[in-house]
Amino acid sequence: MKALRLLLPLLSLAALTAVSAQDIPPAFAGGKQPTVALVRQLCTGDFFSQWLNGAQTAAKGLGMKMVTYCANGDDAKMASDMQIAITQKVDAIIIDHGRDATMAPLVEQATKAGIKVVTFDLSTTDPSVVQIAQNDFLIGLDITMKMLSDLNGTGQIGLVYTGGFDPLDKRKAIFDSILKFYPNVKLDGTWGTVSSNTVGEVESQTSAALLAHPDMKAILAPYDAFALGAMKGVTRQGKDVKVYGCDISTADIQAMIGKDSPWVATAATNPANIGRIAVRAAASLVAGEALPRYVLIEPTLVTRDFLIANNVTNMADLTQKMPAFANTSQLMTPWMSALESKNQ
Ligand code: SR1
């Protein structure tokens, strides 16, 4: 162990010399620390804390300063956070969620001021903005098809949904397109709220929906806070109704593997990877590199049966059993690896 500790600085030095000092982009060379701002619409819950953690780790590795803002769902605050970041002349801004109508003029102002802009879960019309997303169409397809297969194409279902959030709108668009091909599956109702108490509100709404539709067999709840609320509602009513969700975290895994848990499948990526990829995208743009306009992170379907069969109880176990959830090298470049080795 001691030998390894002595070796590490030498290995870092080797990594840095493999990428010669001239290969480090000028914006990062000589200990320069570009600033990246995270302007977030939402930050409550496991998904968003894992996302932030990944972004902070990546920024530290690249030697970037990071300033974070959180609007807690308040669009006016998000706009003012963005304005502050622009005024402070940061090098890059990562916008996490948000409404295009609110953010588009500010995105334009930022890019005109020479600030690099990356979005996660926000579609924008500005072609210079790199848009990162989980492949939400595939998430919608994977989880909807799992539910329809489990139902054998017949039964009454519910949908948890709130409009105006890019990933939720995309997942629902796929659900709508598929459902019309399954005439024996009947949608009993749609409910849902995104708030500081999403889980609690969805629990009550699900409870009410189950009382109104006692024959419901499955609920599509394509966001982990929705799935947690739906499963609590199902449990409160003592019903045999399966829940199909999205996203994953240690708390979600615990909820899925719990005794008689109704949450039987989730379509997800590792949220920490999204944070890392967003920071790498921002760093590349600051370094003057060209990136594709759309960067997609591919999801994986995880079932309750798989988690139980493989003794997966937390995210660390999951990354071992399903490599798709391990640290990704997506958008990583040799100069970034060299900086990470130096800064570890
Ligand atoms: C309110 S939108 C919530 C979703 O954003 C991210 O894309 C997560 O996957 C989550 O489901």
Image (cartoon, grey):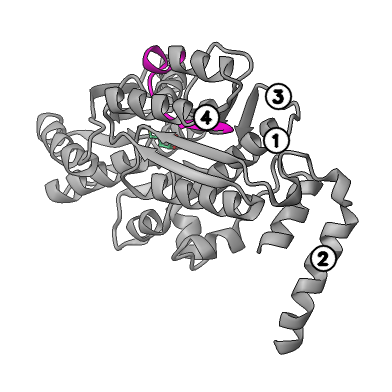
Counting residues from the start of the chain, the first of labels 3 and 1 encountered is 1
Q: Which residue is mark 2?
A: 13
Q: Which residue is mark 3?
A: 292
> Distance from label 2 to label 1 (Cα)?
22 Å
Q: Nearer the viewer, mark 3 or mark 4?
A: 4
Element class at badge 1: helix
Residue 105 place in picture, x, y as percent: 44, 12
Give the crowd class for mark 3: few <14, some 14-19, many >=20 residues within 10 Å: few
> Distance from label 2 to label 4 (Cα)?
33 Å
Give the crowd class for mark 2: few <14, some 14-19, many >=20 residues within 10 Å: some
Residue at image position (30%, 49%) is 262
Element class at badge 4: loop
Residue type indicated by callout 1 = Ser
Taking the image as four quarters, which one is ligand 1 found in? top left
Q: Nearer the viewer, mark 2 or mark 3?
A: 2
Residue at image position (23%, 33%) is 216
Counting residues from the start of the chain, the first of labels 2 and 1 encountered is 2
